[in-house]
């Protein structure tokens, strides 16, 4: 605007930083945030890959405030929108959403606000955005940017595929000149290429953060009784914490939730077979109360912003490492210690193979899916650092073992498994490659079961030659040979085993094989080493001082009250980390309070007095 007096204009970055401090109450950008914000604020496109909890939202929320017009955020889940909008409004940002949950009047109100230029951001479900009337409405107003959240939903290979996402390509044609930013926590190369192509982001600059989540501790145990094992883990480390337990089928979800309730855990089921109201109520309790455990199929969790989920447990094998990484990533967004717990057994492998075989999709699709399954098995069976395996899968090299996964903390003994593997493989060959693990192990152990006798397998030369290992150890050998491709399960999913391509050299004695010795899992009896008990990492664990702790609890009570009054989840008022800093630093006035991370101008004005009063009490 040439007619205005010229002042030296502060750089985009300086203005961004100023808003970050004033509105969010944060000192500095994290990782790539600052670069992304500047890029988009200056009108460029961006593709942002950041792990869950990395701070993606700021990458578009802040440019929305820096640019003229309204920012349109495409988000696939209604619950996520509501939370994000609530959190933004708490910060004093003018945000609303448009989705099917609105009444016609409420929708018209949002539309009026849009036309009058009264909104900084509007969140829209993809199908709503793609409605012709919505597109036409957006063409009439100045737009700051488009943000496409959960952009991996465009990938047909992925488990979150949403057909509407493919149509988002029209934004490039209908709104040339409006910058677009796509964000995801899914990082593999295939998905990345698809996002770029299908969303027409050829010009976008790509920002890839490290996908490491150092505060998450990974643990995989051999499945014996998954619920019991989970309960033991929960009782040891997470009593009173919020967490998510994933299981594969609705039936297991229902049964597990019921069983956990009977054990005194505040557990609730969540899956697509439950009534919408029941699901909503369970999600609501999970978000608004402390210490609720949700047992769910993967239908739960995407778009859950709750920062203080302390553990994610998988009782069945997830479908892929991408899925696993995303699901476990829902733990510990606040950066405090969190656990990822997985139990897995041969049955899981057989079941996933069955799903694969019955799944639709062409050969290429099946091949990709199979490769992904193999990567997952490799992760489960590794005897080296799990984090290194995970990150390598996402194309990242972690130089040193992490020191915060089960194999680092409690190294797995390995043994020369060549001879047992040969015994097993010959048994498979000699019995005609049509039997499952149970029968093969019976033959190796020399058990004269009716089945063994019926097929005359007490006559094969390997009958009884495996008595040096017990049944459990044999099952572990089977699983590891399946994972390594020495054995393959039939694709019809009957569980019968054939020798795979890798078997021949091993049988001929040309190669050797290192196997891991399975440790006894918690919650089961027997075994060599019990896992060392670990300190429970509660929200207040790092407050050593009793007074600090008492103060923290008092602040937490104030927060609960304020959250209830405002009708938002407690963490939308302030995070635990913010309360903790208040408890320790004990600010006496507004200036001191404003200095705490997470206290921006709007929250200071709204809540400052209440928290200062609570601080003065002690
Ligand atoms: P993502 O969407 O990538 O999972 P979020 O945008 O929800 O992550 O951010 C994760 C958490 O980190 C949020 O609670 C957010 O308030 C916090 N956060 C984001 N950026 C910063 C920052 N620069 N400084 C401090 N905290 C931040
Ligand atoms: Zn490790």
Image: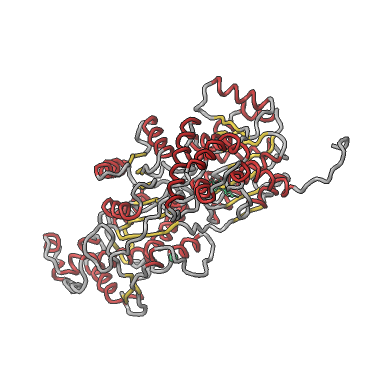
Q: Is residue 503 above or below residue 281?
A: below
> What's the residue at 41%, 57% (across, down)?
373
Q: Is residue 480 above or below residue 490?
A: below
- Residue 367 on image: x %, y %: 45, 56
> What's the residue at 28%, 65% (across, down)?
530
Q: Is residue 45 above or below residue 605?
A: below
Left or right: residue 191 compared with residue 318: right
- Residue 76 on image: x %, y %: 52, 38
> What's the residue at 35%, 34% (across, down)?
274
Number of labels in the image equals 0
Q: Which residue lies most toward the bottom here?
A: 510
- Residue 331 on image: x %, y %: 44, 50
- Residue 112 on image: x %, y %: 64, 23
Left or right: residue 525 compared with residue 447: right
Q: Nearer the viewer, residue 471 or 464?
A: 471
Quadrant for residue 130, please give it.
Answer: top right
Q: Nearer the viewer, residue 399 or 275?
A: 399
Report the quarter where the N terminus lies: top right
Left or right: residue 39 compared with residue 208: right
The quarter of the rendering in which ligand 2 is drawn is bottom left
Q: Can I make out residue 163 in this image?
A: no
Q: Nearer the viewer, residue 481 or 535?
A: 535
């Amino acid at each position: 605007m040439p007619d205005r007096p010229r002042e030296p204009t502060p750089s985009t970055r300086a203005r961004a930083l100023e808003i970050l401090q004033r509105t969010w109450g944060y000192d500095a950008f994290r990782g790539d945030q600052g670069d992304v914000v500047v890029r988009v604020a200056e009108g460029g496109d961006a593709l942002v890959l950041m792990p869950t909890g990395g701070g993606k939202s700021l990458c578009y929320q802040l440019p929305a405030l820096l640019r003229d017009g309204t920012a349109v955020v495409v988000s696939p889940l209604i619950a996520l929108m509501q939370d994000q909008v609530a959190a933004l409004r708490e910060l004093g940002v003018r945000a609303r959403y448009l989705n099917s949950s609105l009444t016609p009047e409420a929708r018209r109100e949002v539309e009026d606000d849009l036309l009058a230029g009264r909104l900084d951001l509007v969140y829209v479900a993809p199908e709503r955005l793609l409605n012709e009337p919505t597109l036409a409405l957006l063409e009439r107003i100045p737009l700051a940017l488009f943000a496409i959240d959960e952009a991996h939903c465009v990938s047909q290979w992925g488990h979150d595929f949403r057909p509407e996402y493919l149509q988002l390509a029209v934004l490039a044609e209908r709104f040339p000149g409006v910058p677009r930013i796509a964000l995801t926590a899914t990082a593999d190369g295939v998905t990345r290429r698809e996002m770029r192509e299908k969303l027409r982001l050829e010009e976008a600059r790509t920002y890839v953060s490290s996908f490491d989540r150092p505060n998450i501790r990974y643990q995989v145990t051999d499945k014996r009784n998954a619920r019991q094992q989970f309960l033991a883990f929960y009782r040891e480390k997470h009593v009173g914490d919020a967490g998510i337990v994933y299981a594969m089928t609705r039936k297991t979800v229902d049964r597990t939730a019921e069983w956990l309730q009977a054990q005194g855990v505040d557990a609730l089921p969540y899956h697509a077979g439950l009534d919408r109201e029941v699901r909503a109520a369970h999600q609501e309790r999970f978000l608004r109360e402390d210490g609720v455990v949700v047992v769910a199929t993967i239908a739960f969790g995407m778009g859950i912003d709750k920062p203080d989920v302390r553990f994610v447990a998988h009782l069945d094998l997830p479908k892929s490492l991408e899925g696993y990484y995303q699901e476990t990533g829902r733990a510990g967004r606040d950066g405090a210690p969190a656990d990822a717990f997985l139990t897995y057994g041969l049955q899981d492998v057989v079941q996933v193979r069955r799903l694969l075989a019955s799944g639709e999709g062409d050969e290429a699709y099946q091949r990709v899916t199979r490769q992904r399954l193999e990567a997952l098995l490799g992760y489960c069976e590794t005897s080296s650092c799990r984090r290194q395996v995970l990150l390598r899968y996402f194309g990242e090299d972690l130089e040193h073992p992490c020191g915060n996964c089960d194999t680092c903390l409690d190294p797995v003994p390995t043994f020369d498994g060549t001879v047992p593997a040969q015994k097993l493989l010959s048994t498979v060959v000699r019995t005609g490659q049509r039997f499952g693990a149970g029968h093969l192990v019976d033959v190796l152990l020399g058990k004269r079961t009716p089945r063994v006798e019926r097929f005359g397998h007490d006559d094969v030369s390997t009958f009884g030659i495996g008595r040096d290992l017990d049944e459990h150890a044999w099952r572990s050998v089977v699983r590891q040979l399946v994972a390594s491709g020495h054995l393959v399960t039939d694709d019809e999913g009957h569980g019968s085993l054939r020798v795979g391509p890798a078997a021949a050299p091993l049988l001929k004695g040309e190669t050797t094989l290192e196997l891991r010795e399975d440790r006894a899992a918690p919650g089961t009896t027997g075994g060599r080493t019990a896992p060392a008990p670990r300190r429970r990492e509660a929200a207040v664990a790092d407050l050593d001082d009793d007074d600090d702790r008492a103060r923290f609890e008092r602040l937490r009570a104030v927060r609960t009250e304020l959250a209830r009054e405002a009708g938002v989840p407690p963490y939308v008022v302030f995070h635990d980390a913010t309360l903790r800093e208040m408890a320790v630093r004990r600010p006496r006035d507004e200036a001191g309070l404003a200095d705490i991370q997470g206290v921006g101008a709007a929250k200071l004005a709204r809540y400052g007095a209440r928290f200062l009063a609570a601080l003065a009490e002690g």
